[in-house]
Image (spheres, rainbow, N blue to C red):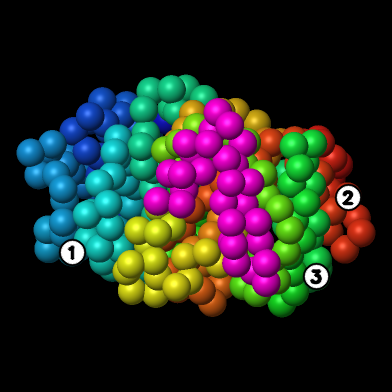
Amino acid sequence: MWAKNIVHTCMNISAGEKVLLITDQPMAQMQERLLPEILAAGPAGVWTYTLPDTARPFLEYPPLLHQVAAQADVAMVFYSYVPPEETPGRLAFWRTCRENKTRVGYGAQIDDSILANELSADYQTIAVITRRLKDRLQGKEWVHVTTPLGTDLTCSIAGRDVKEDTGLIHQPGQFGNLPAGECFIAPLEDSAEGVLVVDKSFPELMVSRPVRMIFEKGRVVAVEGGEEAKEILRRIEYGERLEHGENCRVIAELGIGTNPNARLTGKLITDEKVMGTVHVAIGDNASPSYGGANSAPIHVDGVVGQPTLVVDGETLIEDGIYLV
C-alpha cells in the first residue's frame, strides 16, 4: 500500500515524466520496492541515488544531483535519519528543485513502521479532512485552545494564510512531507496569551510529565514541569545564544493533525499528524512554508491531546473529536 500511495496517489507520477529517487543506505530496500511502481507509471526516465552511511553527514549534494533535479519532473527523497549538519545542503537542493519546478516528496526519519502505518493511510481522505479544516480557519481571526489538563491559550490568525499538508503533491514546484496529514497556520507573533500544557511530545521527546508553557504577548515567559520542561528550556537557551536567538520564545505555528493512521512515536514527522491532536510551535516561522514573520534558529513543536479548538466562536474540535 505505501509504495502505491507514494508513487500514484501522493506524487501522481505520470507517463513521460522524469523521476529522481534518493534514499540513504538504510532505506535502500525502500528504493527497491518503489522502483517497480515508478516504472509501472511509464516514466520517460528514472534516476536513483543511494547515500552511503560513510558519506554522513551529507553536507552538500553533488553537482550531478543538482543537474538531474533540474531536469526531473519529480524528486523523492527518503532518509532514515537526518543529522542537523545536513540542513544547509538539503535546503540548497530544495532551491534547485523549486527554481526548476520539480515537485518534491520528502520523508525524514523513515522506518518500516512508518511505511506500514502513516504512509499506508488513505491520502484522499486525509486531503478531505485537511481541506475542510482549512476552509473553516481561512479568513478567521481568533483561535482558542483548551484541554482537560489546563491548556487555555488564545492567539490571532488574522490575515495569515492557512497551509495544508495533504500528501497530494501534484503541482509543478510543489514541496510536501511524506508522511503527511496536517493543517497549519502561523499566528500573529505578538498575539498568544495564556497557558499551553504539552502532554504528548516534543521533537524527539515523549512527555511523561506535562509541560506548562506560559505565553504573554506572543512569547513564552515560563516553562514548568519535570525533566522534559528542563530539556525544552535547554533547547530555547541554546537557540538564544545564536543569531536571531531573541526570537526563540515567539509563537510560530498552530497545527492540527489529520492523518487517521498517525501514531505518537516521539518523531515529529508522525506526532504532528495524529488525528485528535493539535501542536503549537515556538521559534522560526519566516519561511514561505509557514508564512510568518519571525526568524529564529529553532522551531520547537509541542503536541497536545484532547484539544477543544474554537475559532471565532465556532467549535471545530471538541475533546479531540472533529466536528467538521
Q: Report whether residue 103 is seen.
A: no
**Mark closest to the chain's N terminus, 3 or 1:** 1
Could you tell me the amino acid type at mark 1? Gln
Position of residue 25 in the picture relative to residue 194 (left or right): left
Residue closer to the observer: 283 or 177:
283
In the drawing, what numbered circle is on residue 205?
none
Real-space Cα distance between discs 2 and 1?
A: 49 Å
**Mark closest to the chain's N terminus, 2 or 1:** 1
The residue where tag 1 is placed is 67
Could you tell me the amino acid type at mark 2? Thr
Real-space Cα distance between discs 2 and 3?
A: 14 Å
Q: Which residues are magenta?
A: 207-234
- Give coordinates of residue 95: x percent, y percent: 32, 69
The residue where tag 2 is placed is 315
Residue closer to the observer: 19 or 188:
188
The residue where tag 3 is placed is 141
Could you tell me the amino acid type at mark 3? Glu
Position of residue 53 in the picture relative to residue 114 (left or right): left
Tell me where residue 267 sits by quadrant. top left
Position of residue 312 in the picture relative to residue 125 (left or right): right
- Give coordinates of residue 17: x percent, y percent: 35, 53
| Contact check, label 2 and label 3, Cβ < 8 Å | no
Which residue is depicted at the point 64% across and 69% down? 218
Residue closer to the observer: 86 or 301:
301
Which residue lies most toward the right here? 313
| Element class at badge 3 | loop
- Give coordinates of residue 3: x percent, y percent: 42, 30
Real-space Cα distance between discs 3 and 1?
A: 44 Å
Q: Quadrant of the C terminus?
A: top right
